[in-house]
Image: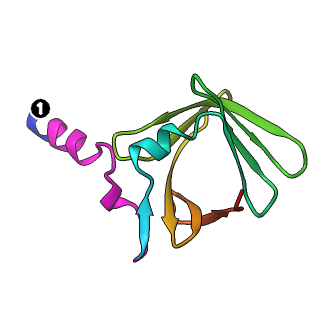
């Protein structure tokens, strides 16, 4: 029984960059680029704004002006994981595709970031 539990835990372990639904030409951000998210605000085409603060604080402001707050961390697979105060959590992978920065969520939906 213990062996099956161990195998199940291995199978459910953290995803790797290869497990994300990336497309040809997508290049996941490097560790240095991920570290450089601190202090940046990324603006999406729906006018949503993801703010990464030094120390791991995170906020997302919707176009309506409502905000969600939490903390972010960088996972071993290079994804950015958000733990919201309301108990919801998610991980996203940021990639460069040509000149564009794109957020890929766990479902595979792609959200381009506006150029700065």
Residue 38: x percent and y percent?
59, 34
Q: Nearer the viewer, residue 50 or 33?
A: 33
Q: Nearer the viewer, residue 31 or 44?
A: 31
Q: Secondary structure at mark 1?
A: helix
Residue 63 colored in magenta in the image: no
Residue 64: x percent and y percent?
90, 49
Q: Is residue 56 left or right of residue 75?
A: right
Q: Nearer the viewer, residue 114 or 16?
A: 114
Quadrant in the rendering for residue 6 = top left
Q: Residues within 10 Å of mark 1 (few under 14, many from 20)?
A: few
Residue pointed to by mark 1: 2
Instruction: Give the residue furthest to the top.
Output: 55
| Residue positioned 33% across, 50% down in the render | 15
Residue 8: x percent and y percent?
22, 43
Can you see residue 106?
no
Residue 12 colored in magenta in the image: yes
Q: Is residue 59 left or right of residue 71?
A: right
| Residue positioned 72% across, 62% down in the render | 114
Please identify the quadrant where the C terminus is shown: bottom right
Instruction: Give the residue furthest to the bottom.
Output: 24
Q: Is residue 91 above or below residue 99?
A: above
Q: Is residue 42 left or right of residue 91?
A: right
The region drawn magenta spans 5-24
| Residue positioned 13% across, 41% down in the render | 4
Can you see residue 36?
yes
Quadrant in the rendering for residue 75 = top left
Instruction: Give the residue furthest to the right.
Output: 64
Q: How many marks?
A: 1
Residue 16: x percent and y percent?
31, 52
| Residue positioned 51% across, 61% down in the render | 107
Q: Is residue 72 above or below residue 43?
A: above
């Amino acid at each position: 029984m213990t062996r099956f539990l161990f195998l199940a835990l291995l199978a459910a372990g953290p995803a790797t960059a290869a497990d994300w639904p990336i497309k040809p030409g997508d290049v996941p951000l490097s560790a240095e680029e991920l570290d450089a998210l601190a202090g940046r605000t990324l603006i999406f085409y729906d006018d949503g704004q993801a703010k990464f603060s030094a120390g791991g604080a995170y906020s997302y402001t919707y176009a309506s002006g409502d905000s969600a707050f939490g903390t972010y961390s960088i996972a071993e697979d290079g994804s950015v994981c958000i733990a919201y105060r309301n108990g919801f959590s998610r991980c996203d992978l940021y990639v460069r595709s040509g000149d564009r920065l794109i957020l890929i969520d766990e479902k595979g939906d792609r959200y381009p970031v506006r150029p700065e």
